[in-house]
Image (cartoon, rainbow, N blue to C red):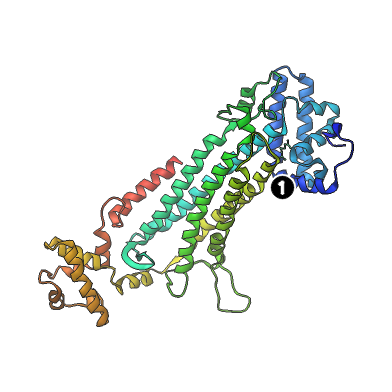
Amino acid sequence: MKLWGGRFTKPTNELVDDYTASISFDQKLATYDILGSLAHVNMLASAGIIEADERDTIVDGLKKVEALIKTNKDVLTKENEDIHMNVEKLLIDEIGPVGGKLHTGRSRNDQIALDMRLYLRDQVVSLVELLTTLQTALLNQAKAHTDTILPGYTHLQRAQPVLFAHHLLSYVFMFQRDAERLMDSFKRINKSPLGAGALASTSFPIDRHFVKDELNFYGITENSLDSVSDRDFVVEFLSDASLVMMHLSRFSEELVQWSSQEFNFIELDDAFCTGSSMMPQKKNPDVPELVRGKTGRVYGHLMGILTTLKGLPLAYNKDMQEDKEGMFDTVETLIGALSLFSPMVETMTVNKEVMYDAVAKDYSNATDLADYLVTKGLPFREAHAVVGEAVLSCIDNHKYLLDLTLAEFKQFSEVIEEDIFEVLDPMAVVNARKAHGGTAKESVEWQFGEAENYLSDT
Ligand code: ARG
């Protein structure tokens, strides 16, 4: 007999049980469901809705049910549909009819909204910790590379040299914003919806603040319809998670490129690569590739929940049961990616000389020649044209700018003097960009300070 079987004359069709049950996935919420029930039952007793001895029996029973589920998942059945009814059924089996008092003044609708918030609250904290660990790994690598220069790109064409530390720091700040977004979402997640009932609250004299305090929520949700029908906190989480994955995916793409033979800028540690079943020479960057690939499923979950919620009338609709799998999968995908990224970044080898060579055998100091001409009085647009000709002539003669003699330089512009050789040196080119946020060593040092301030605040 179903817990709600009273008004039915037949058992549920088995296919309906299969189709509507969520226990195969919402069992992940068991601990949170029981936590919420413990708070609820304590409140019921404190408000005088049930007796103290009934509360004690139910509390003991819930703890036994929790242990039972932990040791044997088979006690959970699809006939009992979801985690809420499974727990209630197991409780009644354990302590008898008094277990039926637990659900007084409560609906599965406010119960699931509570469970999801309790779950997500914990996950957000863990994810922020994982982001901090990754930021620290990036920061450590950056500090080891304050005089490693690599070509900076636009359009994937070499543009201007930058410090490798500067490049890594850019990700530190991206992940900082990701962490801040998650922490900000915490404010909205961390409110208790319990007491909203099915949709209109309850006629029992419940105390929502009691439950809020028991479960360490910042506050309570303000409107019962809103409490049970919105999942914007899930959408927000998935959107924050999508941005984390977007950043990880871009970084992944760079790691894949950099570890190719064509770039050869870095080597990922053997422990973070895999081989080929056929080609013995292969060492594949599977981890960043898979992170890049898994970004798709996280975006998919975001689109999925937005589409599920679109057009749903208030309040609860069974459609909303679809809110969970994408959320769980997103949490697991992020934990997997972030847990691997930190040690992978920490252990990668940086081929400093190859990077330097890529900068030296290149025209990425051309802007500096133009800027030099500007300091000698030429309008920038004219300087740009002069340097364009110099570069073209170098390309024709298989030379780089620093291969030119002073006499050759002077053919392009009389104002060029001996000091040009210092100006065009790759490290000088980098260190000329001293503005706050620039790639010069002194600006990079300043960024370290900013990053560390952020990390000590997180
Ligand atoms: N398993 C349901 C869900 O995840 C719980 C809420 C069900 N409420 C209901 N009235 N059927 O959405």
- Residue 458 in percent (x, y) is at 46, 41
Q: Ligand 1 is located in which of the four quadrants?
A: top right
User: Is ligand 1 less than 8 Å from the beta carbon at label 1?
Assistant: no
Query: Residue most toward the top?
Result: 48
Is 221 placed left or right of 148 in the picture? right
Quadrant in the rendering for residue 205: top right
Residue 346 visible? The answer is: no
Q: Give the amino acid type for the residue marked by disc 1 in the picture.
A: Phe
| Viewer-proximal residue among 155 and 267 | 155
Foreground residue among 116 and 20: 20
Instruction: Say left or right for 64 vs 446.
Output: right
The residue shown at (75%, 41%) is 82
State the quadrant of the N terminus. top right
Residue named by callout 1: 25
The residue most toward the bottom is 397
Q: Which residue is drawn at 88% across and 41% down?
A: 11
Counting from the top left corner in percent of width and height, residue 426 is at 27, 67
Q: Can residue 128 be seen in this view?
A: yes
Position of residue 47 relative to residue 175, above or below, is above
Spot occupied by residue 453 in the image (x, y as percentages of width and height)? 39, 43
In the displayed orientation, state which residue is furthest to the left.
414
Q: Is residue 455 left or right of 378 when viewed as pictured?
A: right
Q: Which of 125 and 378 is in front in this view?
A: 378
Is 367 positioned to the left or the right of 332 in the image?
Answer: left
- Circle 1 — which element? helix
Residue 262 vertical position relative to residue 244 in the rendered view, above or below: below
| Residue at (75% x, 48% y) in the render | 24
Q: In which quarter of the image is residue 10?
A: top right
Q: How many residues crowd around disc 1 within 10 Å: few (fewer than 14), some, or many (20 or more)? A: few
Image label count: 1
x and y, in percent, of residue 252 in the image: 49, 61
